Image (cartoon, grey):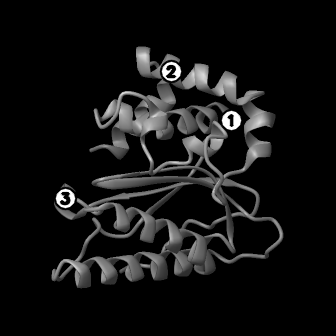
Amino acid sequence: MPRRETPFIPDQYYHFYNRGNNRGKVFFERDNYLYFLKGLVKYLLPYVEIIAYCLMPTHYHILLRIKTSEVLKTSEVSNAMMKFIVSYTKAINKRFSRVGALFQGQFHGEPIKNYQHLLALCIYIHANPVKDGLVFLPEEWEYSNYLEWMELRNGKLVDKEFIVENFGSKEEYQKQVMAYIKTRDLPDDVRNYLSELEK
């Protein structure tokens, strides 16, 4: 697997994502989702702050900020993510007596382009289960931190200051998520970015 050339810069935001090999499933049962989240805490949380995440049956989205308290090299974040994904893949392969790659190549770690992109991506990530027809409301999907954003569940993978600083309140954020679900309206640059991601 080639080395990642994109540097992960402290205090910058990134979108980590990947899908299943051949667009197949990467989560097969509830325990898989929970195991993935435990791995996220173990391997990535020392280096990053989680803003928004959503785990879907065939893919995942993680919006994060690289911590400023560490002088990080690209290799440290990449290596942590690689160990995390290898650990998860081994567990799934053992559980389901399968072999080979689970994910479609190396994970993607794209820098967030601008402030508008950052806020729109939060909304897109949390609305993903509704957009894909898995649930009617985002709070019905257990495997995202929308529940933490809405203060319906306690969890480590959330930055509550981010919510207040950028959306004002959970109620305002909820309004924006529901508006997107109704209209599917996103800024053009974000729509173009997501259309490339979904190819």
Q: Give me the C-alpha separation between circle 2 and circle 3.
A: 29 Å
Q: Which residue is mark 3?
A: 24
In the rendered view, would you say 36 is above or below 59? below
Q: Amino acid at mark 2?
A: Met
Q: For the point 27% across and 65% down, which residue is it?
A: 104
**Residue 76 location in percent, x, y?**
62, 80
Q: Is residue 16 above or below residue 194?
A: below
Question: How many C-alpha atoms fall within 10 Å of the one at disc 3: few (<14), some, or many (≥20)?
Answer: some
**Residue 5 appears in the figure:** no
Give whichever of discs 1 and 3 has the lower sequence position.
Answer: 3
Residue at point 56% right, 48% down? Answer: 145
Name the residue carrying label 1: 115
Say which element carries label 2: helix
Q: Nearer the viewer, residue 79 or 179?
A: 179
Dot 1 surroundings within 10 Å: few (below 14), some, or many (20 or more)? Answer: few
The image shows residue 165 at horizontal and vertical percentages of 81, 35
Q: Residue 126, how many percent across, how many down?
A: 50, 38
Residue under label 2:
178
Describe residue 168's horizontal placement relative to residue 50 as left or right: right
Say left or right for 76 vs 134. Answer: right
In this view, the residue in front, 28 or 77, is: 28
Q: Residue at x 79, y 74 (%)?
A: 70
